[in-house]
Image (spheres, grey):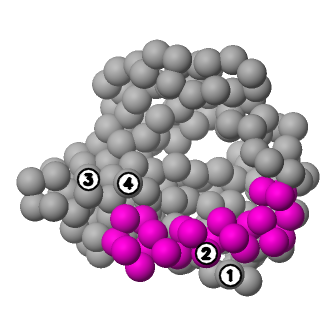
């Protein structure tokens, strides 16, 4: 058995059908971690529309939306968002997910590491932030392994499965 390689690249409109298929298959598993979405979100057309918006953010310089690849197959996403490139700020946030078919193989950790390189080398950012649910231990392990530290709690910050939930806030300085 060989270990799959992990890569990231900018998302493309042609990724819509694959992402929609992953999101449909993983609906129940992701439900406790993510806000409710309209039915259209889970269709190739809905994902195509979302990808168009993400790429518009990329053109505007406010996002770097990527897909996670395992042996050249799309297995998730890693998105750098909220980019503030001003010289006195130079920060962004990062979010990611890996389809259930490819979890527990190290792809999330390697994808975040690659995204950190993009943020520092290509985007010239200084600080990156992330948020996890306090009970999302796998995601917290990914962040810790990539040099993030928790720095606070955003109380009742996200509506998940009908309840307001806290978010654990994480940070990492780049270039240090």
Instruction: Give the Cα separation between the discs numbered 4 and 1.
Output: 21 Å
Q: Judge whether residue 92 can be spotted in this image.
A: yes
Q: Is residue 100 above or below residue 83?
A: above
Residue drawn at (26%, 53%) of the image? 91
Q: Earlier in the sequence, mark 4 or mark 1?
A: 1
- Dot placed on the residue nearer the N-terminal end, 3 or 1: 1
Q: Which mark is residue 82?
A: 4
**What is the residue that sits farthest to the left in this orientation?**
88
Label 4 close to label 3 by CB (< 8 Å): yes
Between the residue at mark 2 and the residue at mark 4, the CA separation in whole angstroms equals: 17 Å
Element at badge 4?
A: strand
Residue closest to the eye, 16 or 76:
16
In the displayed structure, 123 sits above or below 153; it is: below
Q: CA distance from mark 3 to mark 2?
A: 23 Å
Instruction: Look at the numbered discs 3 and 1 and tell me whether their residues touch, using CB distance below 8 Å.
Output: no
Most prominent secondary structure in the magenta stretch? helix
The CA distance from mark 2 to mark 1 is 7 Å
- Which mark sits nearer the N-terminus, 2 or 1? 1
Q: Any magenta on residue 166? A: no
User: Disc 2 designates what residue?
Assistant: 52
Considering the numbered disc 1 on the image, is that residue within a helix, a strand or a loop? helix
Who comes first in sequence, dot 3 or dot 2?
2
* Residue drawn at x 65%, y 51% as measured from the top left: 97
Q: Is residue 54 left or right of residue 101?
A: left
Please give the label number shown on residue 13: 1
For disc 3, the marked residue is: 91
Extent of the magenta region? 40-63
């Amino acid at each position: 058995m060989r270990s799959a390689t992990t890569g990231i690249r900018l998302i493309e409109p042609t990724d819509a059908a694959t992402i929609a298929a992953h999101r449909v298959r993983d609906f129940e598993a992701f439900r406790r971690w993510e806000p409710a979405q309209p039915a259209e979100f889970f269709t190739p057309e809905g994902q195509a529309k979302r990808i168009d918006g993400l790429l518009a953010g990329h053109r505007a310089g406010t996002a770097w939306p990527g897909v996670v690849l395992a042996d050249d197959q799309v297995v998730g996403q890693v998105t750098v968002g909220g980019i503030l490139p001003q010289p006195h700020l130079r920060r962004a946030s990062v979010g990611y997910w890996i389809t259930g078919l490819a979890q527990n193989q190290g792809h999330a950790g390697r994808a975040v590491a690659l995204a950190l390189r993009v943020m520092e080398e290509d985007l010239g950012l200084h600080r990156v932030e992330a948020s996890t649910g306090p009970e999302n231990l796998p995601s917290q392990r990914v962040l810790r392994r990539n040099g993030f530290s928790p720095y606070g709690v955003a109380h009742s910050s996200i509506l998940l499965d009908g309840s307001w939930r806290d978010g654990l806030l994480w940070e990492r300085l780049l270039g240090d």
